[in-house]
Image (spheres, grey):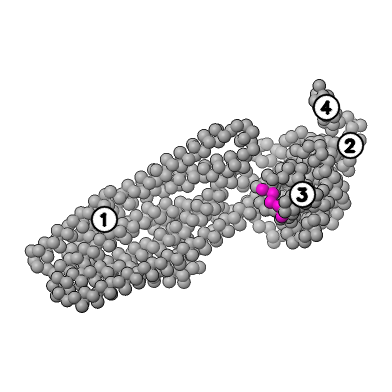
């Protein structure tokens, strides 16, 4: 067997990784592994006994001429094959079930870890990376464990049993077999580092195909609209070619030792044949011993080769396991804070106190921002893009934490309370509505998982969604399609508002909820929003200023600060930044119909 790295101080070393996988993943299934190991031992013993029985048959046939004994030995040999087949079948089924359980546990574990990460964690990564880790990484763990179980339970036991038969039949001839081992060990040791490097590249580049496929299908409307089919095909072809080249290199490196190992094996077999033939022909030795030895030698050749390649295949599998554990081991970017007290909302008075935040160093997005959103009233945030409006809502949802200052609701600093208790008391509706795979009913019920049918229908009616829902085949059971593609923009927005209404939260956050809609859809969505906001503290972001003209307070956000605040009429009289924005929009709105009629 190839030499392993026994440096346990290196957490990514072969032995350290296998020790961890055994302790964390395999130990809980030790009883089932023990049964599989015993069955593999039965299979190995049956293989060795078959080789031994062959020598007996030869001697009974050519020396003793004892036919009844041959019949008995033949039946025993048949029994050995039956036992081997049954043991192989049950051991394979047991190991497969263990593998499936470990894969499922790791997939749950990785997904649970991803749910503890903040938005910042995902912003610099592509979702295809996590798909690859979820599938390939989880499978790699079981592949590594199965390699070791099969190496110890199948190959090593079979090799020991067969070598025992060889030594029993002819100790001197057995020496020839051991000449193969030292050169094979040297060859394998040189290949292990190269295998690890190529396997790392193979695992990383395989995400390119998932990325190209995912982006092309999710953006299929844009692809079709801009005739990007050929460009997407080019990107996919490049990704496939990259993965193909890496896979070809992996195949070359993995099998580089095979020709020399086959030559060494052939040399040992040839020497055994010549020596055995000499004993039988020149020295009148019993042919049964020779045939038994030769059969055991030939049967031992394959498990010996697999054991020699174990370090290569194990290191290739451990690359995927490391990719999975890299994510699992990393500190959660949104650590568990369930031990903190729950946020208790009364009036839901929101206050920003000198809040500072930046996504990148030296590029502040919020700069000592101060404002108050009064309870039960609508506070609108307006201003140019990039001013920090959406970041305000992200901070309220605690997607990000203030780098300086405090966000206070009803006198409670959000940083001192649990995120879950905060988010359970917020209803959020954004411009880009995300609907999940499933039915209309399920998507509305995501706002309140234990909602009754009556509550779902009442929320849909309040959001002016009930009528169009009942027009679908299947009504509330109608599928929405991936990301809600079977619904129009206005329909998706009203489903999202129904989802927010059923939550019955005291704090409402609206981010450009009508920006992408036509006039009729905007009117219906705005009516639904008006119902949603009744007697609730509402913070709304809007570019269309006519939608927030009746807000209780309008805050103009520029450069991460509040530069103006007041009601619509007050701000127009001041003739400041808000008045400039309003006149500009009103002028453009006036020009648009004129240009259309011309």
**Residue at figure coordinates x 85%, y 36% from the top left:** 546
Relative to 388, does residue 343 appear above or below in the rendering? below
Residue 9 in sight here: no
**Closer-to-camera residue (286/417):** 286
Residue hosting label 3: 471
Q: Around disc 4, counting alpha carbons within 10 Å, would you say few (fewer than 14), some (14 to 19), or many (20 or more)?
A: few
Q: Nearer the viewer, mark 1 or mark 3?
A: 3
What is the C-alpha distance between the residues marked 1 and 2?
87 Å
**Disc nearer the start of the sequence (1/3):** 1
Q: Nearer the viewer, mark 3 or mark 2?
A: 3
What is the C-alpha distance between the residues marked 1 and 3?
77 Å
What is the C-alpha distance between the residues marked 4 and 3?
33 Å
Relative to 439, does residue 247 appear above or below in the rendering? above
Residue 193 picture location, percent across and down: 38, 48
Q: Around disc 3, counting alpha carbons within 10 Å, would you say few (fewer than 14), some (14 to 19), or many (20 or more)?
A: few
Seen in the image, is 389 located left or right of residue 102?
right
Residue hosting label 2: 568
Residue hosting label 4: 593
In magenta segment, residue 217: no
Q: Nearer the viewer, mark 4 or mark 1?
A: 4
Quarter holding the C terminus?
Answer: top right
Seen in the image, is 521 located left or right of residue 359?
right
Seen in the image, is 403 located left or right of residue 508?
left
Residue hosting label 1: 182
The numbered dot on residue 396 is: none
Q: Mark 3: which secondary structure?
A: loop
Q: Are marks 2 and 4 in contact (CB under 8 Å)?
A: no
**Disc nearer the start of the sequence (3/2):** 3
Q: Are marks 1 and 2 in contact (CB under 8 Å)?
A: no
Quarter of image, res 432: top right
Q: Which residues are magenta?
A: 477-481
What is the C-alpha distance between the residues marked 2 and 4?
25 Å
């Amino acid at each position: 067997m190839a030499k392993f790295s026994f440096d346990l101080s290196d957490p990514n070393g072969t032995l350290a990784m296998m020790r961890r996988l055994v302790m964390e993943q395999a130990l809980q299934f030790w009883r089932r592994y023990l049964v599989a190991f015993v069955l593999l031992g039965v299979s190995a013993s049956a293989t060795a006994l078959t080789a031994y029985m062959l020598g007996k048959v030869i001697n009974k046939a050519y020396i003793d001429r004892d036919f009844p004994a041959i019949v008995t030995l033949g039946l025993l040999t048949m029994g050995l094959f039956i036992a081997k087949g049954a043991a192989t079948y049950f051991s394979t089924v047991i190991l497969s079930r263990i593998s499936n359980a470990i894969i499922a546990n790791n997939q749950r574990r990785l997904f649970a870890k991803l749910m503890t990460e903040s938005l910042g964690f995902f912003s610099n990564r592509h979702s295809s990376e996590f798909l690859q880790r979820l599938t390939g990484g989880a499978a790699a763990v079981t592949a590594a464990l199965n390699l070791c179980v099969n190496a110890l339970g199948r190959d090593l036991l079979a090799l020991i049993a067969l070598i025992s038969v060889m030594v029993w039949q002819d100790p001197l001839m057995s020496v020839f077999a051991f000449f193969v081992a030292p050169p094979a060990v040297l060859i394998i040791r040189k290949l292990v580092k190269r295998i690890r490097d190529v396997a790392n590249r193979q695992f990383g580049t395989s995400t390119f195909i998932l990325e190209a496929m995912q982006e092309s299908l999710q953006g299929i409307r844009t692809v079709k609209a801009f005739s990007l089919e050929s460009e997407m095909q080019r990107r996919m072809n490049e990704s496939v070619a990259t993965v193909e080249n890496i896979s070809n290199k992996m195949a070359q490196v993995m099998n580089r030792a095979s020709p020399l190992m086959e030559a060494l094996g052939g040399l040992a077999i040839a020497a055994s044949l010549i020596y055995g033939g000499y004993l039988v022909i020149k020295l009148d030795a019993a042919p049964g011993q020779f045939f038994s030895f030769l059969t055991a030698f030939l049967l031992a050749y394959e498990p010996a080769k697999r054991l020699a390649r174990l370090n290569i295949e194990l290191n290739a599998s451990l690359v995927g396991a490391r990719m999975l554990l890299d994510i699992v081991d990393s500190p959660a970017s949104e650590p568990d804070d369930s031990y903190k007290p729950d946020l208790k909302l009364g009036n839901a008075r929101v206050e920003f106190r000198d809040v500072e935040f930046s996504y990148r160093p030296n590029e502040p997005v919020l700069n000592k921002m101060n404002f108050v959103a009064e309870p039960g009233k609508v506070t609108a945030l307006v201003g140019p893009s990039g001013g920090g409006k959406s970041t305000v809502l992200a901070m309220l949802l605690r997607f990000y934490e203030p780098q300086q200052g405090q966000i206070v609701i009803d006198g409670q600093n959000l940083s001192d309370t649990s995120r879950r208790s905060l988010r359970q008391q917020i209803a959020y509706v954004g411009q880009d509505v995300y609907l999940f795979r499933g039915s209309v009913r399920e998507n509305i019920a995501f706002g309140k998982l234990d909602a009754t049918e009556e509550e779902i229908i009442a929320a849909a009616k309040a959001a002016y969604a009930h009528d169009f829902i009942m027009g679908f085949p299947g009504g509330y059971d109608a599928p929405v399609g991936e990301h809600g593609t079977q619904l129009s923009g206005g329909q998706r927005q009203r489903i999202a508002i129904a989802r927010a209404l059923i939550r019955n939260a005291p704090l409402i956050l609206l981010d450009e909820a009508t920006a992408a809609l036509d006039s009729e859809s905007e009117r219906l969505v705005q009516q639904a929003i008006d119902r949603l906001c009744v007697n609730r503290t509402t913070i709304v972001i809007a570019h269309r200023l006519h939608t927030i003209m009746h807000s209780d307070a309008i805050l103009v956000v520029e450069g991460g600060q509040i530069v103006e605040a007041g009601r619509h009429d007050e701000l127009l009289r001041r003739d400041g930044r808000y008045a400039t924005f309003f006149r500009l929009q009103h002028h453009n709105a006036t020009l648009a119909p004129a240009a259309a009629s011309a």
